[in-house]
Amino acid sequence: MKKLILIFSILALLSSVSLFAEEDEHAPSMTLDEAKTVAQQSNKPILIKFVRSDCKYCNKSEVDFDSSQTIQNALSKVILLNFNLQDDYGKQLSEAYDIGKYLPLFILTDKNGDIMHRWDGYSGVDKFVNKLYRSLRDPVTIKEREANIASNPVVRDVNILASYYEDILDYKKAVHYWHQGLSMKDKYRQTYLMKLFENYANGSWNDVYPFDSVKAAIDILFNEPDFNQADLIKAIRMTSNVARKRNRTDEIKQYLIDGIDLTKNSPNPKFNRYAFLFGADYALFIKQDTVSAIKIRKNGFNIKEDHSGSIKDYYPFARYCYDREINLVEAKELLLVVTNRIDDGTYKAKVYSLLGKIAEHNGDRKEALKYVEQAMLNDPDNEYYPEQYTEI
């Protein structure tokens, strides 16, 4: 009799949830508290999915979740919650789960709502299902892993905790666990060192660590024998960006020289393009030669003086100029050319948004608002542009 009552209780709850969802296509399937009740009664974990209506891969996942029997079979193992971050309840719940910038975001919790695993992005049915099943086979919460490490540390727990805290932008805890992993698993020393550098750099960008921490971390990479070249190039780019934000560009001379040496004559064409970036930044920050910096960066994008060349290079070149507060007149001219030559609304909106930033930087708020209005018209589902408009 008790089992029968339990079944009817769950069916009644799910039925009410279904009716609620029919009233509003964006309404959550149920609240988190309701999901916990169902999860505890059914002894299933909870899978929370965060999406936005203007997210391409979120929409792709929605289609597959509705149409793929493979996904539906996998989802039968969990209580699924689907929240749109553009709705009030989704926004409210997102504050408790440290939503980053990459969507869709999936958070797997135990039946009590304690987080076990977290991952972002969607690239197809098979990869999603494999990730979900792997996570279900390891039903340990973050809290439990931290307790386990205190008494019996194992590399897997350390790596999962480091990645988790990195994902939620808690750089200090991430650094703590990556250091612990480095001390336990020397075989993957270079991977741990790169992870440590990335968290110091991102932490410095967000005012968690001083710039000296970034310099110390990248110096370790360069002193490591046969360190991965792609990672070194990435580290130089990140160091240069943080230095620019921190007004410490006078301290990155050697890193830029090393970057030029690594990329200029590399047999890898993907690396060659960074030689122009490092060369331009060297001219700008070290030699204080803005004219040469602009010329080098144009050569990297193959932009001619008469503005001939591939139009797809205009936006990144203009972005380079805006980020460094140089050559903004020409940057604006190139962006206006783009708006007249392309039809893709999403891309055009991005261009208008940058035009708005340049106008605001120049002190012309009226013009800035005009450009951001065009961004909103061309990509009406993107909530960033109304936020940009409000800030201006």
Image (tube, rainbow, N blue to C red):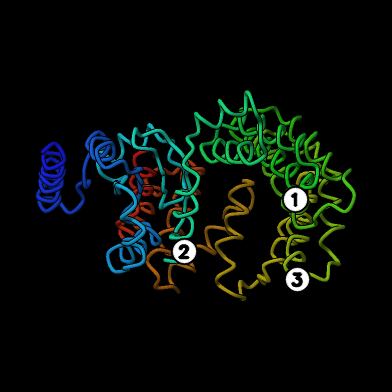
Amino acid under disc 2: Ser
Spatial CA span between label 1 and label 3 = 20 Å
- Relative horizontal placement of residue 177, taking residue 146 as reference (left or right): right
Disc 3 crowd, CA 10 A, few/some/many (<14, 14-19, 20+): few
Q: Which residue is mark 2?
A: 123
Quarter containing the N terminus: top left
Residue at point 70%, 27% (across, down)? 210
Q: Secondary structure at mark 3?
A: helix
Label 2: how many residues lie within 10 Å, few (<14), some (14-19) or many (20+)?
few
Q: Quadrant of the C terminus?
A: top left
Q: Give, as a three-letter code, the residue at label 3.
A: Pro
Can you give x and y, in whole percent of width and height, for residue 239 in the image? 72, 42
**Lower position in the chain sequence, tag 1 or tag 3:** 3
Determine which residue is flagged by label 3: 269
**Gap in angstroms between the C-alphas marked 1 and 2:** 35 Å
Sequence-first disc among 3 and 2: 2
Label whose residue precedes the other's in the sequence (1 or 2): 2
- Would you name the residue on which mark 1 appears? 281
Query: Which of these two is toward me, 126 or 248?
Result: 126
- Residue at 41% across, 35% down: 97
Going by the numbered disc 1, the residue's amino acid type is Asp
* Residue in the picture at 71% in, 49% down: 237
The image's mark for residue 373 is: none
Of 332 and 170, which appears nearest the observer?
170
